[in-house]
Image (tube, rainbow, N blue to C red):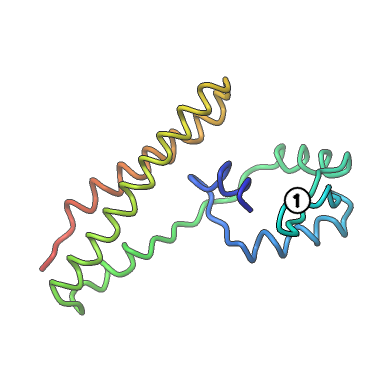
């Protein structure tokens, strides 16, 4: 989970339950196998040759349409039913979260650049733009 979150988290949300539900299913399909047990009884998985072929097929598919789900924007849509203080708290919390996420992604970009991972940098640039856009939007939303 830590590896998936570090690599994909800035631009692809996932839950711990999704990851731990999918790994045994992928193992049943022969796409991954259990690796050497890690610390505190953690169970890493290793991709198999069949998994690499399935991954290559997936990469060649047309991506599906993205779906936008933003809990802050959803609550703003119902802002007329909330107090000014509730809205200000919502905006403050979201601003703090996006500011922290932006700083973390910028650190990941430094690491990706140091590793020469230009594709990782490009994906992380999306996350930077997203958090910047969210912060700009949060400054413009009405507070009553």
Q: Secondary structure at mark 1?
A: loop
Q: Position of residue 31 (x, y in %)?
A: 84, 49
Q: Is residue 112 left or right of residue 47?
A: left
Residue located farthest toward the front when viewing the structure as drawn: 40
Q: Position of residue 18 (x, y in %)?
A: 65, 63
Identify the residue shown where x is 61% and y is 62%.
16
Q: Is residue 3 above or below residue 88?
A: above
Identify the residue shown where x is 73% and y is 43%.
58
Q: Which residue is mark 1?
A: 38
Q: Quadrant of residue 41?
A: bottom right
Q: Is residue 90 left or right of residue 1?
A: left
Identify the residue shown where x is 50% and y is 23%.
113
Local crowd at mark 1 within 10 Å, few (<14), some, or many (≥20)? few
Q: Quadrant of residue 62?
A: top right
Identify the residue shown where x is 57% and y is 57%.
14
Q: Position of residue 61 (x, y in %)?
A: 70, 42
Residue located farthest toward the left when viewing the structure as drawn: 144
Q: Is residue 97 left or right of residue 30?
A: left
């Amino acid at each position: 989970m830590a590896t998936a979150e570090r690599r994909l988290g800035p631009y692809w949300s996932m839950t711990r339950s999704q990851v731990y539900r999918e790994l045994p299913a992928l193992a049943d399909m022969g796409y991954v196998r259990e690796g050497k047990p890690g610390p505190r009884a953690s169970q890493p998985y290793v991709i198999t040759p069949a998994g690499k072929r399935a991954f290559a097929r997936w990469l060649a598919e047309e991506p599906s349409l993205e779906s936008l789900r933003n809990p802050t924007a959803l609550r703003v849509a119902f802002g007329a039913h909330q107090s000014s203080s509730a809205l200000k708290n919502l905006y403050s919390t979201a601003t703090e979260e996006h500011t922290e996420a932006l700083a973390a992604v910028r650190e990941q970009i430094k690491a990706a650049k140091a590793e020469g991972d230009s594709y990782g940098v490009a994906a992380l640039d999306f996350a930077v733009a997203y958090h910047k856009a969210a912060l700009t939007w949060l400054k413009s939303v009405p507070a009553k």
